[in-house]
Image (cartoon, rainbow, N blue to C red):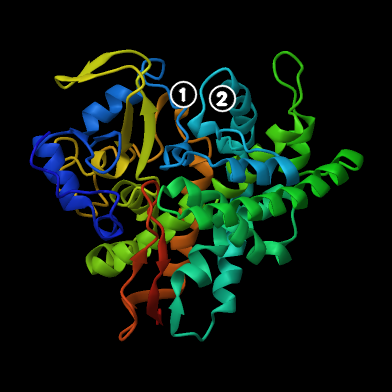
C-alpha cells in the first residue's frame, strides 16, 4: 500500500474529476488497492489490455450490486421473486456459456449493415429533437437532447411506443443506479420495485408479440434459437430486453453525447474544426469516447492466484479496470488530455473493451454520437455554459460518467 490513500474513488467529489488521481496512480501504483473497498484499480493502458485479453484468467462474472456492504439484500430478492423475475447477469458481466448464448443473439442485432440501415432513422430523431428546440436559446442539453435521442432510437428498435419514453427513463435509471455502488439501501429497494414494474410492462409486450410477431427486437428475441435449438426463458428475455437492450442501449450513449458537448465548450478550437469540416465528426466521436469513457470501469475476478506488476493476487480477488484512466495513458496517447482530431489510430482506445467482451452495441453507439453532433453543429456553431446556473454535475457512480444536467446556450449558424 502506498501513500495514495487520499484518492478515494468511492467519494462522489473525487468522481466529478478523477483524472489527476488516475495519473498519479498510473505513475506510481497502476494496480492500486482502494482503501475504502475490497478491490484493485487498474489504471494503465497496457495492464488493462493484458487483463482484458485473458478473459479465462480474469473472468467478468462480478455483480457490482453484490459488492454492497449487505450484498443483494433478501428483501430486494423477494421483490423480484414475488412480482417478476430476478435479473440475470448482463452480457457484459457474465461469462461463457451463458454469455456466449446471449452474445450470439445480440451480435446479430448490431452488425455494421444493420446500423447503416438504421442511420436515417437516427438522423431523423436527432433532427426532430432539434426542431422541437427551435428558437430556444438556453436548454438543458442532457434533458432536451442527449438523453431522449438514444432512448428514442432503442424504443424504435424494440418496437415500443415513443409516448412511453419518459417512463423508460425512470425505469432505465432504476436498472443502472444499483450498479453505481453508490445507491442507498432505500434507493435500491425503490429501484427493484421500478424494475418489476418495467418487467410487467414488457411481459405484456412479449405475450402480444408471441401472438403476433412484428419486425422489432422483442420479436427477434422471442424467435431466437441457440446452437442447440434452445429458446430464451422468460427470465432471460426480461434480462435481455431491460438490461442488455433498453438500459445498455441508451445510458452510456447519453453519457457520451453529454460529455462530448461539455468537451466542445471547453475546447472552442476543436468545435471550430468540426463546424468547418463535418467529416471530422467520426474522429471527434472517438476522442469523446477516449477522454470521457462512458463506462469508466468494469470488474474482473482472479480465477486463480496471479501476479500482476509484481503484486500477488489471490484467487477470487477483484480488479476494476478503469477505462477512464487507461484511455488517458500518456504512454499510449500523445497529449492524452486534449481533443486531437488528427490522432493516429483514433479508435485505439478501450472505451468499448476488446476481445470476447467488446461492446456489442459499439457500432450503434458510434452512429448515435455521430448523428447527434452532425445535427447539432449543422444548426449551431457556438455553445457556452449558461451563466448563473449550477455547475455541470456527474451522477455519483463507480461505473458510469453521466452528467445529470448541462445547462447550455447556443447561437444558430449564420
Q: Residue at x 58, y 17 (%)?
A: 97
> Where in the figure is residue 190, as x and y percent of width and height?
59, 57
Q: Is residue 325 left or right of residue 122?
A: left
Q: Quadrant of residue 223?
A: top right
Q: Which residue is mark 1?
A: 356
Say if mark 2 contacts mark 1, CB within 8 Å: yes
Residue at mark 2 to residue at mark 1: CA–CA distance: 9 Å
* Neighbour tally class for label 1: few under 14, some 14-19, many 20 plus, Cα within 10 Å: some
> Where in the figure is residue 272, as x and y percent of width and height?
28, 67
Q: Which quadrant would the N terminus be assigned to in this image?
A: top left
State whether residue 126 is above or below residue 283: below
Q: Residue at x 34, y 82 (%)?
A: 389
Camera-side residue: 242 or 8? 8
Q: Is residue 43 left or right of residue 378?
A: left
Q: Which residue is mark 2?
A: 99
Camera-side residue: 107 or 283? 107
State whether residue 89 is above or below residue 203: above
Residue 153 marker: none
> Where in the figure is residue 253, as x and y percent of width and height?
48, 52
Q: Which quadrant would the C terminus be assigned to in this image?
A: bottom left
Q: Residue at x 60, y 22 (%)?
A: 98
* Mark closer to the observer (2, 1): 2
* Neighbour tally class for label 2: few under 14, some 14-19, many 20 plus, Cα within 10 Å: some
State whether residue 269 is above or below residue 299: below
Residue 230 in view (yes/no): yes
Q: Earlier in the sequence, mark 2 or mark 1?
A: 2
Amino acid at each position: 500500500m502506498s501513500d495514495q490513500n487520499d484518492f478515494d474513488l468511492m467519494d462522489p467529489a473525487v468522481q466529478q474529476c478523477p483524472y489527476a488521481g488516475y495519473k498519479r496512480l498510473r505513475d506510481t501504483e497502476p494496480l492500486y488497492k482502494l482503501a475504502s473497498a475490497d478491490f484493485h484499480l487498474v489504471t494503465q493502458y497496457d495492464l488493462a489490455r493484458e487483463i482484458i485479453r485473458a478473459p479465462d484468467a480474469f473472468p467478468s462474472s462480478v455483480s457490482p450490486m453484490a459488492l454492497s456492504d449487505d450484498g443483494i439484500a433478501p428483501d430486494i430478492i423477494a421483490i423480484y421473486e414475488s412480482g417478476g423475475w430476478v435479473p440475470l447477469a448482463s452480457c457484459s458481466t457474465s461469462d461463457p456459456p451463458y454469455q456466449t448464448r446471449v452474445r450470439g443473439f445480440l451480435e446479430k442485432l448490431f452488425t455494421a449493415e444493420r446500423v447503416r440501415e438504421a442511420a436515417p432513422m437516427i438522423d431523423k430523431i436527432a433532427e426532430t429533437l432539434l426542431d422541437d428546440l427551435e428558437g430556444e436559446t438556453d436548454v438543458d442539453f442532457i434533458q432536451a437532447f442527449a438523453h431522449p435521442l438514444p432512448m428514442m432510437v432503442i424504443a424504435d428498435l424494440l418496437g415500443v411506443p415513443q409516448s412511453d419514453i419518459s417512463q423508460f427513463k425512470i425505469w432505465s435509471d432504476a436498472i443502472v443506479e444499483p450498479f453505481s455502488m453508490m445507491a442507498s439501501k432505500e434507493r435500491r429497494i425503490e429501484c427493484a420495485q421500478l424494475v418489476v414494474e418495467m418487467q410487467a410492462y414488457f411481459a405484456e409486450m412479449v405475450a402480444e408479440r408471441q401472438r403476433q410477431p412484428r419486425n422489432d427486437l422483442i420479436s427477434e428475441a422471442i424467435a431466437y434459437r441457440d446452437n442447440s435449438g434452445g429458446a430464451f426463458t422468460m427470465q432471460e428475455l426480461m434480462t435481455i430486453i431491460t438490461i442488455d437492450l433498453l438500459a445498455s442501449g441508451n445510458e452510456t450513449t447519453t453519457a457520451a453525447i453529454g460529455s462530448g458537448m461539455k468537451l466542445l465548450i471547453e475546447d472552442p478550437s476543436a468545435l471550430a474544426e468540426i463546424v468547418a469540416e463535418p467529416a471530422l465528426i467520426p474522429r471527434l466521436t472517438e476522442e469523446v469516447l477516449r477522454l470521457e469513457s462512458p463506462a469508466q470501469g468494469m470488474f474482473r475476478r482472479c480465477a486463480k492466484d496471479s501476479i500482476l506488476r509484481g503484486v500477488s493476487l489471490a484467487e477470487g480477488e477483484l480488479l476494476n479496470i478503469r477505462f477512464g484512466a487507461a484511455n488517458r495513458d500518456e504512454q499510449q496517447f500523445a497529449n492524452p488530455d486534449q481533443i486531437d482530431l488528427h490522432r493516429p489510430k483514433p479508435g485505439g482506445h478501450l472505451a468499448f473493451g476488446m476481445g470476447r467482451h467488446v461492446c456489442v452495441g459499439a457500432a450503434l453507439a458510434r452512429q448515435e454520437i455521430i448523428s447527434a453532433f452532425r445535427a447539432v453543429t449543422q444548426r449551431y456553431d457556438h455553445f457556452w455554459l449558461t451563466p448563473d446556473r449550477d455547475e455541470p454535475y456527474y451522477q455519483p457512480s463507480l461505473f458510469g460518467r453521466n452528467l445529470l444536467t448541462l445547462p447550455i446556450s447556443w447561437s444558430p449558424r449564420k
